[in-house]
Image (cartoon, coloured by chain):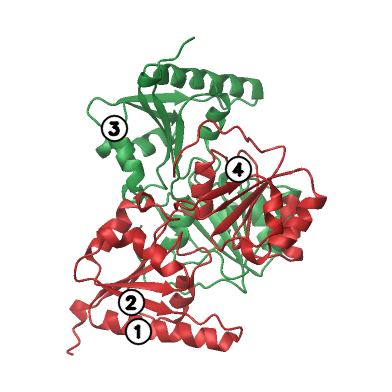
Chain colours: A green, B red
């Protein structure tokens, strides 16, 4: 089919950062202000959080499109659901619309957006705008340098042999999606005393809490929780002033 | 000058992102607009790059304070230099000034700022504002998801046994400051064919270049270069559209 390029829409994948609307980038704001359609992956918590961050920048006429992504254990169902949402986005692009897909944090780090990209047909115009990672915001909030000099950083989102090997060599380990492996991390830290530990839940929200005791891992932890562990040689737990993110 | 605690200054460590002024956060801009003093670590390239990013937001009366940090191999000299700069900042804080310390990228990831923090006296008011990491911007620019699902990410800035161990278990490895170990990485990749490779130099600048062949590592690489290597199972080299950062 002949495409009319003059009317062709564009998809912007926008990282909206960890929660504070002031941690949006200028570039994200400029795009949000002109967006026709705002796609938000719909899950228990994420859709409302993401919309709250961007809402004041949207045009009155902007249409919010909550997108349900299957979380089935059946990979085929998950892929089918991604394809359906990709088709929806393509239709809007073919209509010449400016479509935004929101990602909490960054669109290239553990995001639903990256799965959607796989299923968009070749030739779609897209641009991806990076966002502040949650763990970057957390390290700033705590005045806790993640890595210095020759230090090595590991970012994990699950627990297995490979994660353990990375932890052995890394100076700092960021544990994302920790609600799925907090008991494994607890067991590890119980045996490994030479690590410092901090966990933040709901960073940047009113319900934000900071935990410096690993004992918090014994119980269920909230969905929006990130832990940072550091070998004691590198930890600088000298927090100079408390500050709001 | 009379001390007046009600007038006590505050230090903002601001991450200004990788180069594009539009990748500043709203929060960074709000602070830059009211800053009295702008401290910029002075090295060959960094000071001018950092100032170019923020210049349009500064007050006419803002004073730029280039700070020289010793790069001596003698650690004592480096520490002494950090202490001197920390004293300078403290003086300005005691004068009630709003002091900003600029960091390209993020202030908590391989930054000079984190060394300055160590030497500030307790009680200084500080707040750190995260910035977009260079590798986050690069992954967006290339539409290259860094990690998905259970993937593991490693970030290294030097080459040793530990780095090799992390590479073995990581799905994606970000190599920062690669100009100091490009030959080691080249030798590794020569033996390990199952990795995809991309390197960006001067990301976001007019002189930006993207290299998809590892052969670029055979020669000296520019200071502002970052490489990303990925095990082939996870690489999605389907770049849907070229886009400007």
Residue on which disc 4 sits: B147
- Could you give the CA–CA distance between mark 1 and mark 4, rounded to whole angstroms? 41 Å
Name the spot of residue B116 as percent of width and height, x first. 44, 77
Q: Nearer the viewer, residue B94 or B145?
A: B145
Residue on which disc 3 sits: A34
Residue on which disc 1 sits: B88
Query: Mark 3 or mark 4, which is nearer to you?
Result: 3
Mark positioned earlier in the residue sequence (2 or 1): 2
Instruction: Say whether marks 3 and 4 touch (CB < 8 Å).
Output: no
Query: Mark 2 or mark 1, which is nearer to you?
Result: 2
Instruction: Say whether marks 1 and 4 touch (CB < 8 Å).
Output: no
Is residue A174 visible in the rendered image? The answer is yes
- Could you give the CA–CA distance between mark 3 and mark 2, rounded to whole angstroms? 38 Å
Instruction: Say whether marks 1 and 3 touch (CB < 8 Å).
Output: no
- Could you give the CA–CA distance between mark 1 and mark 3, rounded to whole angstroms? 44 Å
Q: Residues within 10 Å of mark 3 (few under 14, many from 20)?
A: some
Mark positioned earlier in the residue sequence (4 or 2): 2
Which residue lies at the image location 65% right of the left edge and 62% below the top edge? Answer: B220
Q: Quadrant of residue B3?
A: bottom left
The reply to the same-chain question for discs 3 and 2 is no
Q: Nearer the viewer, residue A198 or B199?
A: B199
Instruction: Say whether marks 2 and 1 touch (CB < 8 Å).
Output: yes
Kindly identify which chain the residue marked by label 2 belongs to. B
- Could you give the CA–CA distance between mark 2 and mark 1, rounded to whole angstroms? 10 Å
Say the numbered circle drawn on residue B65: 2
**Which residue is the extreme one toward the top?**
A1
The reply to the same-chain question for discs 3 and 4 is no
Kindly identify which chain the residue marked by label 1 belongs to. B
Which residue lies at the image location 36% right of the left edge and 48% below the top edge? Answer: A25
> Taking A57 as reference, is B201 left or right?
right
Which residue lies at the image location 72% right of the left edge and 39% below the top edge? Answer: B232
């Amino acid at each position: 089919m002949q495409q009319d390029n003059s009317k062709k829409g564009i998809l912007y994948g926008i990282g909206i950062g960890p929660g504070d609307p002031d941690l949006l980038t200028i570039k994200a704001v400029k795009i949000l202000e002109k967006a026709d359609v705002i796609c938000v992956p719909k899950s228990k918590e994420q859709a409302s959080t993401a919309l709250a961050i961007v809402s004041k920048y949207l045009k009155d006429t902007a249409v919010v499109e909550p997108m349900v992504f299957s979380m089935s254990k059946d990979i085929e169902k998950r892929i089918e659901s991604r394809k359906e949402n990709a088709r929806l986005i393509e239709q809007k692009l073919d209509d010449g619309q400016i479509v935004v897909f929101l990602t909490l944090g960054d669109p290239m780090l553990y995001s639903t957006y990256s799965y959607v990209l796989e299923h968009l047909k070749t030739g779609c115009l897209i641009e991806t705008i990076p966002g502040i990672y949650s763990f970057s915001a957390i390290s700033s909030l705590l005045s806790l340098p993640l890595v210095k000099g020759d230090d090595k950083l590991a970012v994990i989102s699950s627990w297995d042999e490979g994660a353990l090997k990375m932890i052995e060599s890394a100076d700092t380990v960021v544990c994302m999606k920790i609600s799925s492996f907090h008991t494994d991390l607890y067991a590890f830290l119980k045996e490994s005393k030479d690590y410092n530990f901090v966990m933040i839940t709901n960073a940047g929200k009113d319900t934000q809490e900071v935990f410096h005791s690993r004992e918090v891992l014994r119980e269920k932890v909230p969905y929006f929780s990130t832990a940072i562990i550091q070998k004691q040689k590198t930890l600088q737990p000298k927090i100079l002033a408390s500050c709001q993110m």
